[in-house]
Amino acid sequence: MKKTIVTLICLVFSSVLFSQKVMTRSGEIKFDATVPGAMDPVVGTSNTVSAILDKATGDFVVQGMVKSFKFKSPLMEEHYNENYMESDKLPKTTFKGKIVGFDGKNGTYDVEGDLTIHGVTNKVKTKVTVSNAGGSVTVSGTFTVKLNDYKLEVPAMAKKTLAETAKISIKLELEDKK
Amino acid sequence: MGKTLKKVIIAFLLLAIIGVVGFFAARYYAYHGGKRDVQSEEAAFTLKAKDFVAEFTANEASANKKYLEKPVAVSGAITSVNGKEVILDDVVVCNFTTPDATLKVGQTISIKGRAVGFDDLMGSVNLDQCSINN
């Protein structure tokens, strides 16, 4: 009996200890949909991406504000917001999923989950690199997204400047919740 | 070479130069021009940080419609300063273009910025291109 109680207490405590969440609100997402050889790079970057990772379960959520993506060209930024992403109506891009088999160690992991862009949700699977340094956990990775999969059609006129596949790089430095 | 021919050649060269410069100027303008300056715009709404966020938690879609993209002046107490990011009453995240060293935690202030959206992970509303609202 005593043993069970001790074990139970240990279990409760360990679950409390390990249900640690790490978070950020200043993560970076960059996407690149430049047509190779085109004159103008189509690159947007946001440095205000928020994310939460549950170190115990590997549950991983990322949210980026569509309007927070900055472009070198204000005109391009306007087209991106108004003609493609419709950011007034659909202001968010989210990922909800899991870092599979997350054990806190440095290395490469599979990530699976639902990616929502432009109001369209698709199941995605990719790889991320996890590295620990000075109390923070850095999750980074690169993957590609087909614009068509998210109802983002590239009109014939724009095919020379806007690629149909975007390369997305993500870098999140997650720290203990303050 | 006749004097008139020389003049014609010079005129053509000048035209060519004007054409090239004009082309690049137009391209530069199309690429870089039209940048918005939120700081110079009059705030479309002036309200308290808590009330601002409450509208988003109550009905996100209608708050999006009302506020997104607009210059909004939000007041509250500073609860965090982290580089360019200043947080009011824990719920409104203001991103400045350059860090402002004069801002301190505890200070009550009004900040104007462009409404970017509601972050339901953090339960906060984000503003960017922020400046201190006087």
Image (cartoon, grey):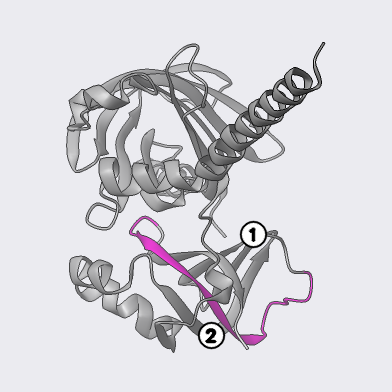
Q: Position of residue A45 (x, y in %)?
A: 51, 39
Amino acid under label 1? Thr
Q: Residue at x 41, y 60 (%)?
A: B122
**Which quadrant holds residue A4?**
top left
* Vertical relation: A160 (above or below) A94: above
Amino acid under label 2? Gly
The answer to whether the residue labelled 2 contacts the one labelled 1, judged by CB atoms less than 8 Å apart, is no
Same chain letter for marks 2 and 1: yes
Density class for disc 1 (Cα within 10 Å; few <14, some 14-19, many ≥20) is few
In the rendered structure, the answer to whether residue B54 lies left or right of residue A76 reads left
Q: Position of residue A111 (x, y in %)?
A: 36, 23
Does the rendering let one see residue A110?
no
Q: Position of residue A157 (x, y in %)?
A: 27, 25
* Vertical relation: B98 (above or below) A147: below
Is A169 in front, or is B112? Answer: B112
Density class for disc 2 (Cα within 10 Å; few <14, some 14-19, many ≥20) is many
Q: Earlier in the sequence, mark 2 or mark 1?
A: 2
Looking at the rendered image, the quarter that the C terminus of chain B falls into is bottom right
Q: Position of residue A40 (x, y in %)?
A: 51, 26
The residue range painted magenta reads: B101-121
Which tag is nearer the camera, tag 2 or tag 1?
1
- The secondary structure type at the circle numbered 2 is strand
- The secondary structure type at the circle numbered 1 is loop
**Which quadrant holds residue B133?**
bottom right
In the rendered structure, the answer to whether residue A110 lies left or right of residue B83 reads left
Q: CA distance from mark 2 to mark 1?
A: 20 Å
